Image (cartoon, rainbow, N blue to C red):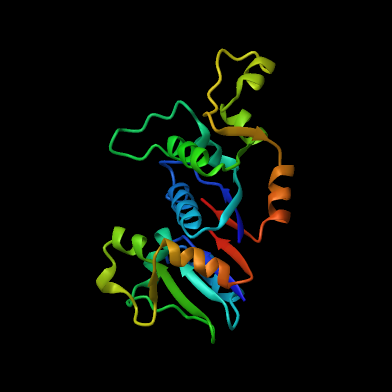
C-alpha cells in the first residue's frame, strides 16, 4: 500500500512529530511504500539542520534524513511555512538576502501542490496533528 | 469504514465529543499520544454502537496506564497502527 504522511508538529513541542517518525518506520518495516512526507505549519521545524537537542534525546531531522537515505523517501517542506519561520535553503537565503541557510540535507522546500499530488497518488494520507 | 485517531486527553471534551459524534458503526477509534488517557477505566468512553476502540501500546506504557485501561480497549503496537490504516478505507485524525 502507498502511504503519505502530513506532519504538523514541531519536534520537542508535541509528541506527534515523533509519532510520525515511528509510524514511518513501522510502515516501511511492513513492506509498504511512503510516497511523500510533507512537513507543514510548525512541522517545518523538523527540517532544521541547526536543531541541537541534548544527546540523550532524539534528533528527528537527522533520523528523517537517515530514513530517507535508506528508503529513498521524499521529504518535502512547505516553502511558505518554512520561510516565515526561518527555515531556508540556499536559494531562499539568497533571494531574501539572509546571512545563512539551515534546511537539513535530505529535505526539499516546495509548495502545496506536492501535498495535493501526494493525496491523489497515495492509498492513505495520515495526518499527525499538533 | 473509517479509522479515527485522537491524540488529545479527555480534558479536551469538545474534541472528544466531536470525534465520537463522527464515528459510525464499523469504524475504529485509535487513541494515541495524550489520547491514551481517554482509555482509562475511570472515564468510560461513550462509544456509538458498533465502534471499536483501541490504544497505542507505547503511549500507554509511557504514561503508566497499563493497569488503568478500560476492559474492551485493545492495545496495538506501531505495526498494528499501520495495519489498522490498511484495514480501513480512510483515516481521520482528530487533534
Residue at image point 30% right, 58% down = B62
Seen in the picture, residue B55 relative to A15 is either above or below; the reply is: below
- Splitting the image into 4 quarters, where does residue A57 fall? top left
Seen in the picture, residue A129 relative to A44 is either above or below; the reply is: below
Residue at image point 57% right, 68% down = B86
In the rendered image, residue B38, in percent from the top left (x then y), is placed at 40, 69
Q: Residue furthest bottom?
A: B49
Total labels drawn: 0
Q: Please give left or right for residue A6 compared with residue A16 in the image.
A: right
Residue at image point 60% right, 80% down = B24
Quadrant the N terminus of chain B occupies: bottom right
Residue at image point 27% right, 69% down = B66
In the rendered image, residue A54, in percent from the top left (x then y), is placed at 31, 33
Q: Please give left or right for residue A65 compared with residue A76 in the image.
A: left
Q: Please give left or right for residue A11 compared with residue B92 in the image.
A: left
In the rendered image, residue A113, in percent from the top left (x then y), is placed at 74, 43
- Splitting the image into 4 quarters, where does residue B68 fall? bottom left
Amino acid at each position: 500500500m502507498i502511504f503519505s504522511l502530513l506532519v504538523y508538529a514541531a519536534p520537542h513541542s508535541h509528541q506527534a512529530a515523533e509519532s510520525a517518525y515511528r509510524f514511518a518506520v513501522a510502515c516501511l518495516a511492513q513492506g509498504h511504500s511512503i510516497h511523500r512526507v510533507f512537513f507543514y505549519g510548525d512541522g517545518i521545524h523538523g527540517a532544521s539542520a541547526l536543531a541541537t537537542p541534548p544527546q540523550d534525546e532524539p534528533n528527528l531531522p537527522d533520523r528523517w534524513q537517515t530514513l530517507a537515505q535508506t528508503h529513498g523517501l521524499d521529504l518535502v517542506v512547505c516553502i511558505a511555512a518554512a520561510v516565515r519561520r526561518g527555515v531556508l535553503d540556499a536559494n531562499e537565503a539568497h533571494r531574501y538576502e539572509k546571512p545563512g541557510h539551515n534546511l537539513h540535507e535530505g529535505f526539499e522546500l516546495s509548495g502545496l501542490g506536492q501535498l495535493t499530488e501526494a493525496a491523489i497518488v497515495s492509498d492513505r494520507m495520515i495526518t499527525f496533528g499538533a | 469504514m473509517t479509522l479515527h485517531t485522537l491524540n488529545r486527553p479527555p480534558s479536551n471534551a469538545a474534541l472528544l465529543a466531536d470525534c465520537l459524534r463522527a464515528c459510525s458503526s464499523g469504524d475504529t477509534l485509535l487513541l494515541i499520544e495524550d489520547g491514551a488517557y481517554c482509555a482509562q477505566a475511570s472515564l468510560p468512553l461513550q462509544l456509538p454502537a458498533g465502534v471499536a476502540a483501541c490504544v497505542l501500546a507505547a503511549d500507554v506504557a509511557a504514561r503508566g496506564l497499563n493497569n488503568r485501561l478500560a476492559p474492551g480497549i485493545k492495545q496495538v503496537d506501531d505495526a498494528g497502527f499501520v495495519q489498522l490504516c490498511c484495514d480501513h478505507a480512510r483515516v481521520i485524525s482528530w487533534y
